[in-house]
Amino acid sequence: MTDAIECPHCLLHVLPTNGICPSCAKDVNDADLAIQSRHQRDLADLIETLKQKRATDTAVTEAAVQAGFTSDLSSQLLANRRKTVIAARFEIKKKYLWPGYPAFIFGTGVTVGTLTDALHGGEYIAVLYGMIFYGLCSILVGHMKLRSYPL
């Protein structure tokens, strides 16, 4: 029985067939690429660790150069990370904040408006508390998730 190895091309753990990765159909014994991908992954891990500590891009590049990586490679991986983080933040905003703010504002507006109207003899609509609660929860969850993706 063979052990699963990491393909240097697709970075997945696979069981190669005759040295060929079943995922990307490339040779898993490409030693130069294996060293290069491991080197890039180490740099990506360093960048991620420093960015989680809210380090600036300049500080990350300097730390990468001190760790023995080239500044070009660190700049490239930093740019790729930034694109990924921006895309993740956009998805969070789309899923939580875009529906949350309008729901909260609409629910609060209708509730306050009908409450004001009720004070002058009109009717009060209390069914929109759920919309206010949904909006508030959605906004809070969205902002907590955004904090986990620092730029």
Image (tube, rainbow, N blue to C red):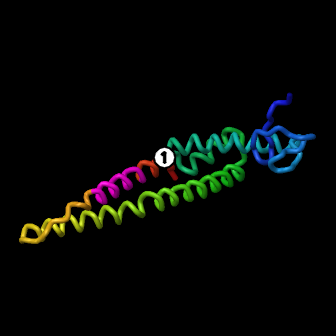
Q: Is residue 39 left or right of residue 83?
A: right
Furthest residue toward top? 1
Relative to 27, residue 101 above or below: below
Residue 106 vs 63, above or below: the answer is below
Is 29 positioned to the left or the right of 132 in the image? right
* Residue 60 can be seen in this image: yes
> Element type at marker 1?
loop
* Front residue (pair 32, 7): 7
The quarter holding residue 17 reads: top right
Q: Is residue 27 left or right of residue 131?
A: right
At a point 29% along the width and 65% down the height, the residue shown is 105
Q: Look at the picture and state if 53 lies above or below 101.
A: above
Q: Which residue is pictured at 78% across the width and 38% down the height?
A: 6
148 or 99, nearer to the observer: 99
Does the stretch in magenta take in 134? yes
- Residue at x-position 67% and y-position 49%: 74
Q: Nearer the viewer, residue 85 or 12?
A: 12
Crowding near pointer 1: few (<14 within 10 Å), some, many (20+)? few
Q: Which residues are magenta?
A: 130-142
Q: Nearer the viewer, residue 106 or 55?
A: 106
Provide residue 143's location: percent of width, then percent of height: 41, 52
| Image position, residue 30 (x, y; %) | 88, 43
Q: Position of residue 100 (x, y in %)?
A: 37, 60
Please give the residue where the numbered disc 1 appears in the rendered image.
Answer: 148
In magenta stretch: residue 35 = no
Q: Is residue 31 visible?
A: no
Residue type pointed to by label 1:
Ser
**Which percent across, then down, holds residue 147?**
45, 48
- Dominant SS of magenta comes to helix
Looking at the rendering, in which quadrant would you find the N terminus? top right
